[in-house]
């Protein structure tokens, strides 16, 4: 469903735009994703709306069929990219799983601010972004996905999320369409 509205207190959640991840071979140019994310970030900050910067520092427990990567991540791996220009008012969430709400205090922090809707952007579409959007939906937040401000290394995962998962979770639109809704509501 195309993006139609934003609640009065909508938060922007930016997933995993950090040094250790942005060098992956994504299907869309990471510079363009960062540029669109930055436009959203600036628009939310200008209006005093909550911004959540999410990084990942480890891996969820449990056994999978895939071999585990080393638990020893290089120095600076989890550092947010400088283009996000982290501000004191930003909420920082450090996660150890795909979604930003699992085993963190993000839900409580957003609800304490009166947030009823989230706009999700970042990497990777089929993992961190989708898991965060699913968790937000399951917790009762209205969900909007900024589809041109996200990418994935796997084209099939990216396409599946956009075509089959996101329409079930909420509304999707471009960063510019979301900024346009912020402009139109006079926030």
Image (tube, grey):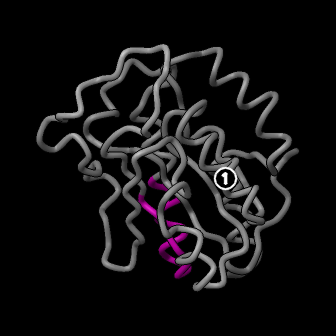
Q: Is residue 91 above or below residue 82?
A: below
The residue closer to the viewer here, 160 or 87, is 160
Residue 53 as seen in the image, left or right of residue 107? left
For image coordinates 49% across by 69% down, the residue present is 105
Residue 94 as seen in the image, left or right of residue 40? left
Whether 134 is among the magenta residues is no
**Residue at the spot of label 1:** 135
For image coordinates 77% across by 65% down, the residue present is 140
Task: Name the quadrant of the N terminus.
Answer: top right
Which quarter of the figure has residue 114? bottom right
Q: Which residue lies furthest to the front in this view?
A: 63
Q: In this view, does 114 lie above or below 168?
A: below
- What secondary structure is found at the residue carrying circle 1? helix
For image coordinates 38% across by 79% down, the residue present is 89
Residue 175 as seen in the image, left or right of residue 6? left
Magenta region: 38-53
The residue closer to the viewer here, 143 or 150, is 143
């Amino acid at each position: 469903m195309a993006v139609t509205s934003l609640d009065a207190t909508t938060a922007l959640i930016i997933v995993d735009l950090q040094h250790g991840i942005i060098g992956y071979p994504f299907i869309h140019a990471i510079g363009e994703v960062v540029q669109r994310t930055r436009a959203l970030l600036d628009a939310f900050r200008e209006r005093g709306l909550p911004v959540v910067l999410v990084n990942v520092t480890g891996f969820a427990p449990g056994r999978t069929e895939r071999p585990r990567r080393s638990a020893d991540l290089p120095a600076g791996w989890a550092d947010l990219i400088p283009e996000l220009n982290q501000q004191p008012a930003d909420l920082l969430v450090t996660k150890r799983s795909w979604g930003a709400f699992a085993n963190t205090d993000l839900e409580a922090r957003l609800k304490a601010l009166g947030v009823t809707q989230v706009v999700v952007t970042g990497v990777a579409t089929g993992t961190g972004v989708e898991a965060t959007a699913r968790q937000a939906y399951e917790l009762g937040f209205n969900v909007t996905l900024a589809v041109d401000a996200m990418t994935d290394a796997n084209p099939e995962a990216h396409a599946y999320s956009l075509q089959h998962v996101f329409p079930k979770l909420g509304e999707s639109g471009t960063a510019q369409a979301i900024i346009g809704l912020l402009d139109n509501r006079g926030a």
